[in-house]
Amino acid sequence: MTLRAFFFAMVLLTCSSTGQAQRKFEQSKTLGLTANTAYYLGEVNPFGHFKGRFQPGFGGFLRFNMTRRFGVRASLNRAVLLYYDSDSNDPWIANRNLHFRNAITEGAVVAEFNYSRYQIGNTKDRFTGYLFAGLSLYSHMPEAQIGDVWYELQPLGTEGQGTATGEGRYATTGFAVPFGFGFKLNLGHFSALNLEWGMRRTWTDYLDDIGGYYASTAVLEDESGPLSEELSEARIEREGTLEDPVGQMRGFNGLDDRFAVMTVSFTFRIDKSPTTCWDR
């Protein structure tokens, strides 16, 4: 090996070691504890962002920071939706007079991209905004209340699901695409505060148990029981003179529901002690 080739090989080895050391320096793992509240867009709330009877939720996540700009987060959250037709300014929705509660449990894996370089505990990189997107698996069960008791709606088939004249019951698990933005702020050498808003694009129209048309109340009473009939139709004023609302519109058929989660998270570095001797 010539002296020139040896020198070139040493330069490459040094650059490679420096790059690996820098990447290792930037990598970290963080644990987050989350408080949340959520809202949804669907038949009871078609267009109003940040509307609803907000309920508390909770969750947690583990984040793998690959670099100061990029990370991957695995999370588990529980968020609660609560909506009443009577709260709507739309006369048709208010007259429908339905309501629902839905506690959604969601497990998600998302990729995060920081607007600027950020590292928890780093006094030089204390704050950044970020974008995220990924995939989640969620489970849900809409409920409605009679008196002091909440009843699960999917087994009741309130739009005729499971009866001789209806379709099969809708799924209570599904995939969603979460996406949104947030902000990260260091609180010290070991902890940070995260604020986040994220929408979930789903492929179900039944987070609210309202998807299409009224079923025959006679069929519901016969095949699903009087509870299904009572929770299916509660209009203040009926359309026309027909006693049985079968075939009349109950929801906006074909419009998938979506829900958004707003979170406040406290994040803690868990893999190693950060140092105050940060350099770039």
Image (cartoon, rainbow, N blue to C red):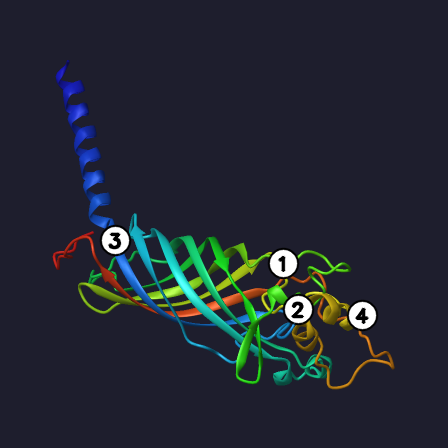
Q: Pointer 2: what residue? A: 210
Check disc 4 and report the residue beneath it: 246
Neighbor class of circle 4 (other Cα within 10 Å; few <14, some 14-19, many 20+) is some
Query: What residue type is disc 2 on?
Result: Ile
Is residue 167 depicted above or below 186 in this figure?
above
Q: Image quadrant of residue 85? A: bottom right
Amino acid beneath label 1: Tyr
Which callout, 2 or 3, points at the residue further toward the start of the chain? Answer: 3
Q: Position of residue 196 (x, y in %)?
A: 40, 67
Q: Residues within 10 Å of mark 1 (few under 14, many from 20)?
A: some
Callout 3: few (<14), some (14-19), or many (20+) C-alpha neighbours within 10 Å?
some
Which residue occupies the foreground of this view, 69 or 223? 223
In this rendering, position of residue 67 left or right of residue 256: left
Residue occupying image coordinates x 68% and y 71% = 225
Depth check, front residue: 231 or 218: 218
Q: Secondary structure at mark 4?
A: loop
Q: CA distance from mark 4 to mark 3?
A: 56 Å
Q: Earlier in the sequence, mark 4 or mark 1?
A: 1
* Location of the N terminus (image quadrant): top left
* Label whose residue precedes the other's in the sequence (4 or 3): 3
Residue at x 82%, y 75% (from the top left corner)? 244
Q: What residue is disc 1 on?
A: 170
Q: Determine the residue located farthest toward the top in the rendered image.
A: 1
